Image: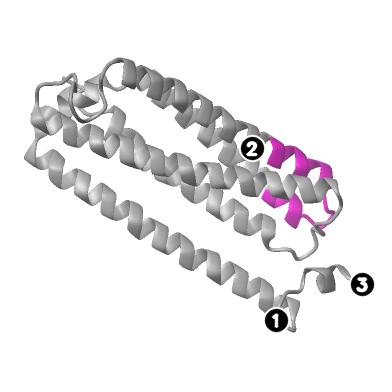
Amino acid sequence: MSDESALLREPWFDFSRQREAGKFGIWVFLASETLFFGALMLTYTVCRIEHPGAFAAAGRETNIWYGTINTAVLLTSSLTMAVAAQAAEAPVRLRRLVLAGLIATALLGIAFIVIKGFEYREDIDKHLVPGAGFALPQAGAQLFYGFYWLVTSVHAIHLSIGIALVGRLVWVLLRHELPLHDNPEIEVTALYWHLVDIVWIFLYPLIYLPGRAS
């Protein structure tokens, strides 16, 4: 059985059509995710315009060091994912380089989640969870932290899904069950991973920079 026959799935009878459909599908999915996060950011912008002082005070309470380190971690993971994707597309298939890039990407993703866990622990200790006992007196500050907890947890869920997808690729590559030739799986996973990273790049200034300049 050829590599293409092994990868062919119903209802497709031609591998090239299946590949194009997979790429089209991920772009549609990424567009829907962009709309979702865009709506959240628009809501944040409206609330920040209504409560500029409260958002500045709340922003100063975030730990910019955790945020900056995690930004560097995700940017590095985008690099390692790009290396893996390019190695998979190279004329001479560089399976070991693909594996190394994917493993590094997954480990960096896990590092992000761990660092975020420490940051959440600090936020809880500082009573920065909206609700009874919230530490800041400004009403708008609870809106800021409501946004903070919502978008960072949703982002962490998306990143965890990405880690699982990358881990699956590593597993099937190690078992030699994933041919690299003309296979969209690594490219599709890379596109998803890069979207998650781009979302964080937009979230970073919204969460960690308000009130820092004053």
Quadrant housing the N terminus? bottom right
Q: Can the viewer see residue 90?
A: yes
List the residue tagged with mark 1: 12
Instruction: Determine the residue positioned at 48% across, 46% down.
Output: 158
Is residue 63 located in the magenta-colored stretch of the structure?
no
**Which quadrant is home to the C terminus?**
top left
On the image, the x and y values in percent for residue 59 come to 23, 26
Q: How crowded is mark 3: few (under 14 residues within 10 Å), some or many (20 or more)?
A: few
Counting other residues with Cα less than 10 Å from the Cα at mark 2, is it few (<14), some (14-19), or many (20 or more)? many
**Residue tagged by mark 2?**
106
Report the magenta residues as a range.
85-103
Type of amino acid under label 2: Ala
Residue 192, image x, y percentages: 54, 53
What amino acid is at disc 1? Trp
Q: Can residue 82 be seen in this view?
A: no
**First along the sequence among labels 1 and 3:** 3
Residue occupying the point 54% across, 42% down? 160
Give me the residue at 20% from left, 49% from top. Answer: 43
Name which quarter of the figure residue 132 lies in: top left
Circle number at residue 1: 3
By secondary structure, the bulk of the magenta-drawn segment is best described as: helix
Residue 58 image point, x, y percent: 20, 25
Residues 154 and 112: in front is: 154
Amino acid type at image mark 3: Met
Task: Report the Cα–Cα distance between label 1 and label 3.
Answer: 17 Å
Residue 91 belongs to magenta span:
yes
Tell me whether the residue at label 2 lies in contact with that at label 1, contact meaning CB atoms closer than 8 angstroms.
no
